[in-house]
Amino acid sequence: MTIYARIRKKVRDICAIRYRPKICEKMRNQLTNKDFTLISSNCISGILSHDLGLEFRSPTVNLFFTADDFVKFCLHLDEYLKEELISDDEMSKEKGYPVSRLWDIHLYGVHYHSHHELMNAWNRRKERINHNNLFICMTDRNDCTNETVAQFAKVPYPKVLFSHKPYSEYPFVVYVPDFSKESEVGQLQFYADMQGHRYYEKYFDWTSWLNKYE
């Protein structure tokens, strides 16, 4: 990021923070489906739940998956949730943060200090999952391919995928043109404008989507 881009982002963030409480208040007032679980491939579920004033009901808070691993996880959710998290010490040392293995997939605990902390949070929050009110969210980050998106289409829950390019054949894909010149979407939890909207809110109405399946 250039110095100019950093300055622009700093100014945007300062302005956005002023408006953010009103946006959160509006979303909380509009939301009628308050007992849902949002499983996400990255930090979106935790940030959105915080903004909506809801308890964390997803074990995927504060971590991320590779795209293919996340789709596998969602396609076989019940089976994976029965498995025990195992620390991948070698990969943890390489990454500099805890990486845990769940059967044949990896969880990257970028916001955790240890495997023990990650495991405790995972086990605590997976008990809160509402399997009858479950939503899935992923992005095209972390090696997402066209085949990954095709596999994601098979996930049997209400779902959304944020992408840097359009997929007209998949109604669950939300195109984010701000990243059309990139190879994947950026950090969607960042502010997209000075009015306080995050990128994942700019082109998608979360409360209408969640309320639709109440």
Image (cartoon, rainbow, N blue to C red):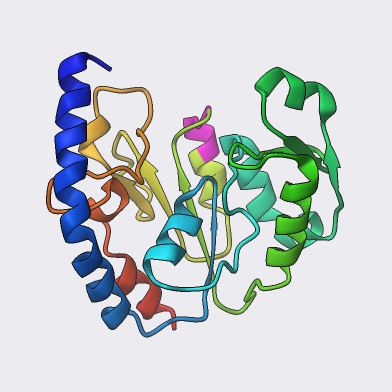
Q: Is residue 5 above or below residue 123?
A: above
Q: Name the quadrant of the N terminus.
A: top left
Q: Is residue 147 magenta?
A: yes
Tell me if 98 is positioned left or right of 189 in this view.
right
On the image, which quarter does residue 204 sit in?
A: bottom left
Q: Position of residue 120 (x, y in %)?
A: 77, 56
One can see residue 114 in this view? yes
Q: Nearer the viewer, residue 149 or 144?
A: 144
Which span of residues is magenta-colored?
143-148
**Residue 34, picture quadrant:** bottom left
Left or right, residue 52 beside residue 115: left
Image position of 130 (left or right of 144):
right
Is residue 182 shown in magenta? no
Out of 123 and 180, give the one closest to the viewer: 123
**Residue 203 to residue 91: above or below:** below
Q: Residue at x 39, y 73 (%)?
A: 210
Quadrant showing the C terminus: bottom left
Residue occupying image coordinates x 22% and y 74%: 26
